[in-house]
Image: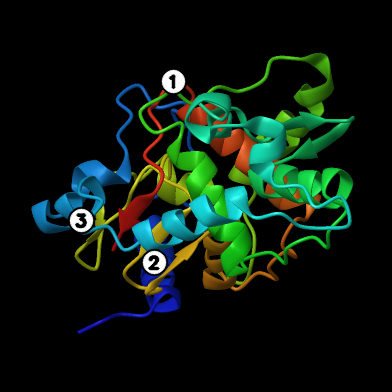
Amino acid sequence: MRIRLPTLLARLTVLLLLSGMGHEAAADEVGSARQSGYAHMSPATQAMQDDPSLNPATFWLLDGQVLWQDKAGPKNLSCADCHGDAATSMKGVAARYPRMVEGKLTNLDGRLNLCRTIQQQAPAFPYESKPLLSLAVYVGAQSRGMPIVVEQSPAIQDHLEAGRTAFYQRIGQLNLSCAQCHAQRAGEKLAGNLIPQGHPTGYPIYRLEWQSVGSLQRRLRNCLAGVRAEPYAFGAKELLELELFLNWRAQGMPMETPGVRP
């Protein structure tokens, strides 16, 4: 029987109280024994991610490959016109986002839309639209197997600290933080479900629960709704900063895009 996320989180609240963890405990925020959520999936789901012929996100990747060559806007330019072969020019690019772009914290979706609006002079793709997800999957796949890298610069430090604060901040009616699940209790089970460490190695991912590809921000908004907090809008500074901190926790881990998760 499927148990809804709010019910699971409510049970977690009770478990925290019963175990004496109602206060903030020290957490290994980087993770001395880091594991991707892939490590805890069933062999069948792992095989689905590993084999492009089985991975449902391959349909998005192929759409992104077409969009890479698609000319748009009054300049009649494609991504390929500027960047050439994505297998070469985009290698390692997705592994470096979010990062500062023209003085503003930007994730991969935002960077793709900047190219679209500035270089192609075409309308931006809406968040979570199939074209934007498809391009993000295609570009992200060029970094598959490469380590996640977090930009080191004074300009990004305030955003990183804000993301760290958000990770430990209790929020919502259930009064839970990201750290209570994904740092303090990672690897334990809640109602039979293993709690992952929350490393964003495979985004955009295909979730069997969604029956679709989705971004990391979609997953973060799901979590916010699950603890009964008001989700930030897609593209909000708060979500970008949390993305940045999650990548900092995962730096050095290999990219899996496009990942598959239950």
Which residue extends farthest front?
Answer: 76
- Could you tell me which quadrant the C terminus lies in? bottom left
In this view, the residue in front, 66 or 47, is 66
Viewer-side label of 2, 1: 1
Q: Secondary structure at mark 1?
A: loop
Looking at the picture, the colour scheme in use is: rainbow
Q: Residue at x 80, y 28 (%)?
A: 158
Q: Residue at x 21, y 59 (%)?
A: 54
Residue occupied by mark 2 = 14
In this view, the residue in front, 147 or 40, is 147
Task: Of the two numbered discs 3 and 1 on the same chain, state the one appearing first in sequence.
Answer: 3
Q: Which amino acid is tagged 3?
A: Met
Residue occupied by mark 1 = 252
Task: Of the two numbered discs 2 and 1 on the same chain, state the one appearing first in sequence.
Answer: 2
Q: Residues within 10 Å of mark 3 (few under 14, many from 20)?
A: some
Q: Which mark is residue 119?
A: none
Instruction: For residue 57, say whether it is visible.
Output: no
Residue 88 position within the rendered picture, expressed as x and y whole percent measured from the top left: 51, 25
The CA span between labels 3 and 2 is 35 Å
Instruction: For residue 91, say whether it is visible.
Output: yes
Q: Secondary structure at mark 3?
A: helix
The CA span between labels 3 and 1 is 24 Å
- Could you tell me which quadrant the N terminus lies in? bottom left
Q: Residues within 10 Å of mark 1 (few under 14, many from 20)?
A: some
Residue occupied by mark 3 = 48
Labelled pair 3, 1 in contact (Cβ < 8 Å): no
Q: Residue at x 84, y 43 (%)?
A: 119
Task: Of the two numbered discs 3 and 2 on the same chain, state the one appearing first in sequence.
Answer: 2
Q: Which amino acid is tagged 1?
A: Gly
